[in-house]
Image (cartoon, helix red, strand yellow):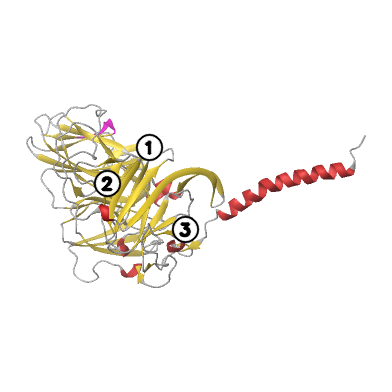
Amino acid sequence: MAEPKPRRLRGRLIALGIALAVLVPLGFLWATSLVPGDYSPTEMGYADFGGGPESGEHEHHHGMNVADLTGPQTGTPDVAVTLTARKQKFQLASGETVDGYTLNGTSPGPLIRAKVGDLVQVTLVNESVKDGATLHWHGIDVPNAEDGVAGVTQDAVPVGGKCVYRFRAEQAGTYWYHSHQVSADEVKGGLFGTIVIAPKEPGEVLAAIHTYDGKRTINGRTGSQHVDLPAGTTARLRVVNTDNSILRVGLIGTPYKVVAVDGRDLHGPTAVTAAYPLAAGARVDLEAVVPAGGMRLVAGAANVSVGIGPAGAEPPSAELPGETVDLLKYGTPAALGFDPGKADRNFEYRIGRRPGFLDGVPGLWWTINGHKYPDVPMYMVAEGDVVRMKISNSSGQAHPMHLHGHHAVVLSRNGVAATGSPWWIDTLEVGNDETYEIAFVADNPGVWMDHCHNLPHASQGLMTHLMYEGVTTPYRIGGKSANKPE
């Protein structure tokens, strides 16, 4: 017997109601997740004043322009370099072919060498990188207009275009440069190089670690290599991690000292034999006296290494020890130059992960303080502020967090106070279920990225900004310039 029409109608209405109850919220979540195709980075998210004065200038259209926060615009440069970016197939120093990106025909690009006080001028020419390119000076606290972030401090340089960067080399150390346009692709493909601010020393060894198409390299060379240095030479190894994940590095064959991290010297370093945990984007300088039998720098695994010692010597080869250097208690204390206990701003940067939509795409997305990109906090400061920030991570994965334009000192990890040398960083590995407290002085006005340097993570939303009150930018993400920093 046929079901009565009122009952069938009621059933259909119930089914429709259930469907609407599911689809309407999903539709709302989908619609609210869409990222505008053209927007200013200063308009994203919501202002977080960290307990300081609220200026109401998060969405302002006046004040100091990022484009005016430049390096010296006059004067003859002490160091002048032109870098031509290309999309091409190229050979690694060890012979393998890679289809990626080059600067002046090589990857890594040329080493830029400067001394403290030098005026550096670098001209980027984009010959064939179709998405555009920039140069970001990772770890060098340049003026904001020179920072090289597409859509924030400049427009991406299109094919056939060029951009001139000028800045004063004010802090000795080991740094690197890379594109900050579609950076998850361009950096991985080879659009990067190294920069050292210091005179070349007889015992200097530079080691830029990068993985091309699954092949880990040191200075663009797979396998093991050798650097001739006489026994008794004090060697300084400048090690740069250009990959997206942490890497254990260290010396086999002799104890060594950790003398600098992220371009800042450590106070009272002592000899160790443990491995050093080098975060993605970070740098470390190791110092050791070359023994008669030589020594070996190992990057993760013993088959990716640099033997260092007299010609003909066979430095020992082995895996790195399981113990790691802990900078929280390494070295001896020294004055910071400011008092973190008198902070003007106190921020939280809570990294999480939850399911949902990002720009209309379903997935498991990173969050900052419970919010998905672009509805993330904009950390607001004023020039001269002492800033404390607590970075916590409950996302299930580790994140190397990189703040542009500033160096911060680590105060504590998981509630345990730092007791060693001041540990200054621009890139900090925050493991899952870890919490760090850091502090810095807001002394470099601008709009500065603060993001995960596992670059795919940044492209998936783990990115926000530190913004000075009274600063605005004429640049936009997306739009006609097709700026896409991550």
* Marker count (numbered): 3
Pick out the residue farthest to the right.
1
Which comes sooner in the sequence, label 2 or label 3?
3
Horizontal side, residue 452 vs residue 250: left or right: right
Q: Which mark is residue 214?
A: 1
- How far apart marks 2 and 3 lie (CA) works out to 27 Å
**In the displayed structure, would residue 95 be above or below residue 193?**
above
Query: Which amino acid is tagged 3?
Result: Gly
Task: Pick whichever of labels 3 and 1 is earlier in the sequence.
Answer: 3
Magenta stretch: give its range: 300-306
Residue 57 appears left or right of 110: right
Identify the residue position indicated by label 3 in the image: 45
Camera-side residue of 419 and 31: 419
Q: Main secondary structure of the magenta part?
A: strand
Residue tagged by mark 2?
A: 410
Which is more foreground, mark 3 or mark 1?
A: 3
Given residues 313 and 177, the one toward you in this image is: 177
Q: Residues within 10 Å of mark 3 (few under 14, many from 20)?
A: some
Residue 110 place in picture, x, y as percent: 25, 52
Determine the secondary structure under disc 2.
strand
- Tag in front: 1 or 2: 2
- The answer to whether residue 94 shows anywhere in this view is no
Q: Mark 2 is on which residue type?
A: Val
Badge 3 marks a residue whose secondary structure is loop
